[in-house]
Amino acid sequence: MSERLPLPQDPDAVVIGAADRRDEYPVHVCRSEADALARLVAELDGRRVAMITDDDVAELHARRLAEGLRTAGLDVALTSFPAGEANKSVATATALLDWLAATELVRRDVVVAVGGGVVIDTVGWVASAYMRGVPYINVPTTLLADVDAALGGKVAVDHPSAKNLIGAFYQPKAVVTNVGYLATLDRRQMRAGLAEAIKKGVIASPELFELIELKQTDILAVDPDTVARLVHGASAIKCSLIAKDPYEEDLRRPLNFGHTVGHAVETVTGYGPVLHGEAVAFGMACASRIAQRRGLLDAGVLDRITGLLSAVGLPTTLDELPAELDAERTIAAMGQIRKIRDGLIRFVLPVELGETVIADDVTDEEIRASLTAFPT
């Protein structure tokens, strides 16, 4: 029976609108495609599926996964778009919206994103926009997506003026991770993903940082047990951090460690030559150098952070980046970020492993010195 509501007596009174919502979703960390498929079938619960991936992942995993769902009795439509950060765009998103409209997907149905960060971010935003929001499930296939992009519902596409400028907060229905997919990655992609796990160790978990220090060789060799432990731990840590502020109402978030410089690097180099994890690693090194010069971070801890990044093959200096980077253009790109973020650039600065502070008074001179520093 519907509720009867009184008509307000004072037409000049302020009307209060309210919307309180808490999203929770399971994160399944699996070690085989068979296990992942079973978890995915259970989460889909008989609904129609619109599976979206990129051209590379379609051949590696998604076509086989779609066939597995069909064998389980599900109706699956599959499409893909060209791989690469350059295709994380409004144009790609618009084409995918047109495709969804042609499939006649309805709100009860589910979009399934299969791929790395580009796919996860793009498809999540498309799902948030189609019919004002349809359910979606993430099936990450890279280490970076496993420990970062697939979690937290930060969905977006890039714009020439800034990375992730056009997006939303829209949580997935579930995340189904198969660490077995990582065996198909090349070393560079594994290293890039490991940057995001190292980030979580620096900002929140000395134990995770130590695990990577001790097991870096096994991780890069994709040892199943070690990688499963890494992904499970990093996922749990990120979910705990997100739960404190899921919609980033407080912009002073430790998860942005390395991203202030990292996003500017990606923008200046044109979204592609420098992988996201490589840019974040360089950004973490820059932020750590700023912290050390301010007297916030012990030189030994700085060496430990930059040493681990270097040991796993990630860039910490300009000459180690896989593309030429102009320091002044990078600083100018951060000026654009300043305009977007209420006039301030906020740096997450490590104080020790597991503890950070936020600084919104970092000068261009400090940034320039951190960008152009050479290893001691």
Image (cartoon, helix red, strand yellow):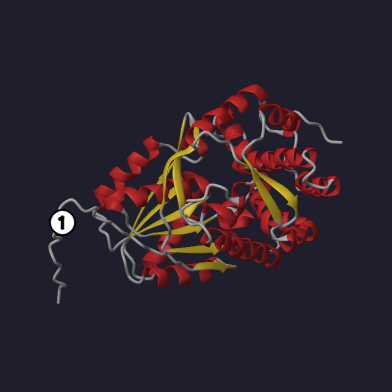
- Quarter location, residue 166: top left
Residue under circle 1? 10
- Residue sitting at 50 percent across and 45 percent down? 118
Q: Secondary structure at mark 1?
A: loop
Q: Horizontally, is 67 left or right of 12 in the view? A: right
Q: Residue furthest bottom?
A: 1
Residue 336 can be seen, yes or no: yes
Q: Residues within 10 Å of mark 1 (few under 14, many from 20)?
A: few
Say if 264 sits above or below 135 in the image: above
**Percent coordinates x, y for residue 164 in the rendering:** 48, 40
**Percent coordinates x, y for residue 305 in the rendering:** 77, 48
- Residue sitting at 21 percent across and 53 percent down? 13
Residue 326 can be seen, yes or no: no
Q: Horizontally, is 255 left or right of 303 in the view? A: left
- Residue sitting at 79 percent across and 38 percent down? 293
Nearer to me, 66 or 123: 123
